Image (cartoon, grey):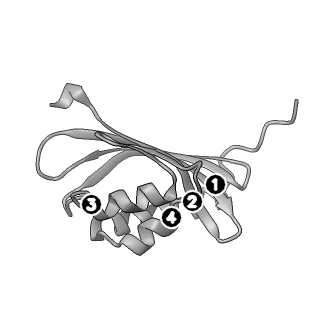
Amino acid sequence: MTASPEINRPRAVAEVRTAFEDYERALLDNNLPVLDGYFWDHAATVRYGVAENLHGGEEIARYRRECQPVGPGRKLFNTVITTFGDDYATVSTQFRDGVTERVGRQMQTWVRFEDGWKVVAAHVSVDLSTL
């Protein structure tokens, strides 16, 4: 058994927060090249959404070009970033879509690669109790 990684090193948390905030801006702006760049372009990448199950970077990028973009009124709350050592992190957040009172949830697993932080797994769902 290996030693447990150090949790929430300040530098790693700051780096992931910066990447996540940049990702969120790109999501609101529907900036597809930036969004594509934040997902690991690999067959093992997974994104499960409210109504879609996507496997692989190509499928995720194709979905982004076909789906309804996120509205500019989206607001995040209860965001939690947890890092494990310097190279692994999770980001969990809730959001409101800015149009309805519906609440959604989003979780992402981030890994540091040579070219920066990338999402390797993501899950988006709607809190059915808020419908």
Residue 101 placed where, x, y %? Answer: 14, 41
Disc 2: which residue: 40
Q: Taking the image as drawn, is residue 92 in sight?
A: no
Secondary structure beneath label 4: helix
Residue at mark 4 to residue at mark 2: CA–CA distance: 7 Å
Residue at mark 3 to residue at mark 4: CA–CA distance: 18 Å
* Mark in the foreground, 4 or 2: 2
Secondary structure beneath label 2: loop
Q: Which mark is residue 66?
A: 3
Above or below residue 18? Residue 106 is: above
Q: Along the horizontal axis of the image, is 82 left or right of 92?
A: right
Image quarter in which the N terminus is found? top right
Residue type at mark 1?
Answer: Val
Mark 2 and 1 residues: CB-CB less than 8 Å, in contact? yes
Residue at position x 61%, y 49% in the image: 89
Mark 3 and 4 residues: CB-CB less than 8 Å, in contact? no
